Amino acid sequence: MTSIVLKDLTLPSGEGADIVISEGVITAIGKSSDVGIDCAGLQVLPGFVDVHTHLREPGFEASETIESGSRAAAAGGYTAVMAMANTHPVTDTAEVADFIFDSGIKAGLIDVQPIGSVTKGLQGEQLSDIVGLASARSRVRMFSDDGVCVFNENLLREALLAVKEFDGVIAQHAQDPTLTVGSQMNAGALATELGLAGWPALAEESIIERDALIAEATGSRLHICHLTTAGAIEVVRWAKKRGINITAEVTPHHLLLTEDLVRSYDPVYKVNPPLRTHEDTLALRAALLDGTIDVLGTDHAPHSAEKKQCEWQNAAFGMVGLEHAASVLQEVLIGHGGDWQQFAKILSTKPAQIASLANHGKIEVGATANLALIDPSAKRLIESQTQSKSTNNPFAGITLPGQVVHTIYRGRFTVRDTKVQDPA
Amino acid sequence: MKHLTSIRELDTAAALSLLDNSQQLSLINEREVKKLPFLRGKTVVNLFFENSTRTRISFEVAAKRLSADVINVAAESSSVAKGESLKDTAQTLQAIGADAIVIRHPLSGAPKLLADQGWISASVINAGDGAHEHPTQALLDALTIRQGLGLSTDLSGLKVLIVGDIRHSRVARSNILLLNLLGASVTVAGPKTLIPEGIEEMGTRTLHSFEEALSEKPDVVMMLRVQKERMQGEFFNSPADYSRAWSLEGQRLAMVSKNALIMHPGPMNRGFEISSQAADDPRSQVLKQVTNGVAVRMAVLYRCLSGESQ
């Protein structure tokens, strides 16, 4: 493997520097006398890590494959993603986890790390083979039934105790199913006008509070997926103050988009949890700034066209996000009280810690060269067609700042000059 | 206008113009030869995913009086029952030559989706979608109120009371929006379980006592149909309890002003939400509403298909 010299880039601290990469590792940060790739004007960041991606393989390859999802991730500046367990078959055994892990290696563009399901078949009745998943080749550390809530308190408690053995984490989809039967959108006046069943904030907030207390009792790590309400932030703030080992995530769409888009009845805006109010988006941004929310997770959820080109109530929940997450974060953070160091923490360092990915989240000599280089001055009109196999892109038609110019994964370009590179 | 999927698409001027047009067109319904050539050569498809004899027939008569060809598609007897998507069904109807699709659908938003997604170029007219809207019903109600109270412009200063199952009612939603456009003040009344969260933001007050609402002497009392299965269980104790508190009957009928109008979109559950005495009262507009339905739907079809703005 040859060495790469990146010239005149800007570090997250704001300092200018050159970075030298050799044999997949960062070997020097500072002034290099070697000639190299001109990176003037580019912001270097540790390669992004997504704790919440649906890659759809195995089982739903019409929507996404590990290969196409990897391309989308690389294009978005990611060097690692956590693949959610709601595959078919469900990722509740070592065999499925290792298949996903190996397929990621084969695709060769990012680290694909499987998430195990908490319960068998996502049925919420019996725990998955958590020990078997943890000791598989793919060393599963994160567990989630995302898409559905682990509603049974005792099962959740047992799962938290099980993952504590290896410092694993449970990622909870906080949604009380009894309060959200048939729910289609945020509850409130707009849902009433549109004649759609509401998804009340209470259904999210009550589960987070309950789960925080269970995590306190077990002393385990609990991660809350996709926070969406101002009230949920208050609960997480309370739990952190109490010393509970809890982390929280927000998605790009919940930071930027609001329930008003549902007026169109266009299912591209149908997502679970639903888009909320403008006030909620402001509260989520403030919570990201003050650290109550730890990470940005995309909840990248590709769906094939026929699952979205139908009546709202018949459409699938979910939207893609890998290729625009960094731009959304730049839009809401930079120039609004946040800086690039905080950006790096939210999109890389902290998610890598939550997911126990030692080779990500760092720009330092001796670290694996997983880097994203973005042009913060770029403005781009988002198109629905991207690297993903699916086009359920709610950001289409919006102009966002920032463009991923290069992504470097294990010392190799996976994106160069905005073009996804074929793996070596 | 090209489509009519929601009252939200109208402003006050457009609503008044539609009512004026409807008034003119209603005269044709009194002639011996009830036919105008305006939509000759146009094809109107009534695409009904839900049973509704009266709305379907009303649209059919309206289209025929304007000389359009009419095709009725009942979804349960079509390929929809075999799992065809709304998109494919609509594109098939357009390929056959539909210029307008009048759609009734149990799912809120289906008409707007059809109008906006670019799947078809035909006009889309909402004949009732889920718990969302029923815009032609609101228009025919407004026309009936104008005629019944001898008005010729808007409904400024009128007090309209809507009573019953507001939660599940598309008629209530369209009426609240249109009555606001026309300057009326709207109050809805019903049991707490049947008044949905935030309905006030659409432009209405909410009361939970029929007597209190009637004591304000509304100019119009609009009763809504309440499905019997919703009078028991989750929303209400029993049909008898519902009737005791919310039926327009006896003492309550006596509270309605002498010159006020009693309305009901039909079909009525006589003896449940409305007594026969109220339904057959001289103040009752129920049949006038049905008659006006044809004129309003003629105006809407003409406006959507002729390409004229106002």
Image (cartoon, coloured by chain):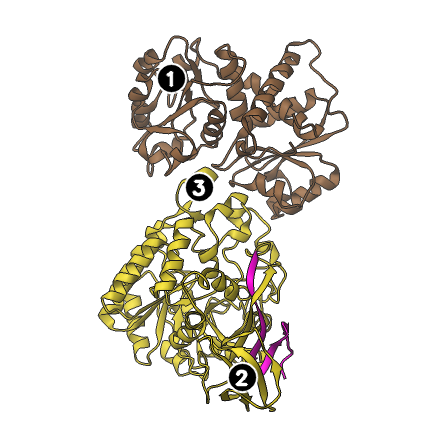
Chain colours: A yellow, B brown
What residue lies at 35% left-to-right and 76% top-to-bottom? A168
Closer to viewer: mark 1 or mark 2: 2
Question: Would you say the magenta stretch is mainly helix, strand or loop?
Answer: strand
**CA–CA distance in space, label 1 to label 2:** 78 Å
* Residue A254 visible in rendering: yes
On the image, numbered disc 3 is attached to which residue?
A190
The total number of labels drawn is 3
Q: Position of residue A318 (x, y in %)?
A: 50, 58
As for residue A403 lying within the magenta part, the answer is: yes
Crowding near the residue tagged with mark 1, few <14, some 14–19, many ≥20 C-alpha atoms within 10 Å: many
Image-based side of B14 in relation to A223, left or right: right
Q: Secondary structure at mark 3?
A: helix
* Residue A99 visible in rendering: no
What residue lies at 60% left-to-right and 48% top-to-bottom? B83
Closer to viewer: mark 3 or mark 2: 2
Q: Judge if badges 3 and 2 mark residues of a common chain.
A: yes
Image-based side of A376 in relation to A166, left or right: right
Q: Which residues are magenta?
A: A399-424
Which of the labelled discs sits on residue A18, or is there none?
A: 2
Q: Judge if badges 3 and 1 mark residues of a common chain.
A: no
Foreground: A194 or A20?
A20
